[in-house]
Image (cartoon, rainbow, N blue to C red):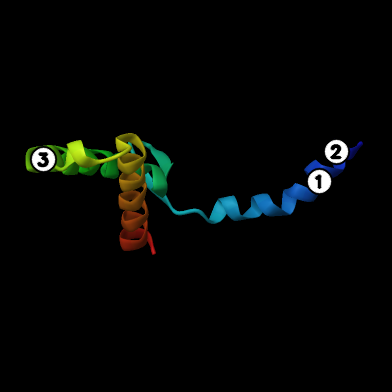
Amino acid sequence: MRVLLAGLAALPLLGGCSLAPSVYMAGSYFPAWLVCVLGAVPLTLLIRWGLIRAGVDDALPMRLPVYACLTLALTFAALLLFFD
C-alpha cells in the first residue's frame, strides 16, 4: 500500500518531462541533452589530444574524472548556448 501511495505522490513530478527540449533527427525525437553529449564527446577527445601534445595530460592526477567533468561541462554549455 505504501508503494502505491508513493507512486501516486510522484505522478505530479512527471509532468515536467513533456516540457524537455527535443530535436527531430532521423525520423524520431531525441532529447536535446543527448544531442549535446554526442557533440561534447568528440570535443573532449580533441581537447585531450591537445593536452597530450602539450604534455599536460601526464600531470593530471585523476584523468577519468577530469575528462568526464570536461564532457559534462561542454554538454551543459551547449545546452545553454543552443537550447535556452
How far is the residue under mark 2 from the one under mark 1? 6 Å
Answer whether labels 2 and 1 touch (C-beta < 8 Å): yes
User: Dot 3 corresponds to which residue?
Assistant: 55
Identity of the residue drawn at 32% across and 57% down? 77
Q: Residue furthest left?
A: 53
What's under tag 2, amino acid-wise? Leu
Residue 73, image x, y percentages: 34, 52
Residue drawn 17% across the image and 44% down it: 47
State the image coordinates of residue 83 (x, y, percent, origin top left).
Answer: 37, 59
In the image: residue 36, left or right of residue 13: left
User: Where's residue 74, x and y in %?
Assistant: 30, 51
Question: Does dot 1 land on a helix, a strand or a loop?
Answer: helix
Give the amino acid type for the residue marked by disc 3 in the picture. Answer: Gly
Residue 4 has which mark? 2
Q: CA distance from mark 3 to mark 1?
A: 55 Å
Of labels 3 and 1, earlier in sequence is 1
* Residue matched to label 1: 8
Question: Residue 25, located in which quarter of the rendered image?
Answer: top left
Q: Nearer the viewer, residue 69 or 33?
A: 69
| Residue beneath the point at 92% across and 36% down | 1
Between discs 2 and 3, the one toward the N terminus: 2
Mark nearest the camera among 3 and 1 is: 3
User: Label 1 amino acid?
Assistant: Leu
Dots 3, 1 in contact, CB < 8 A: no
Position of 22 relative to 4 (above/below): below
For residue 36, say whether it is visible: no
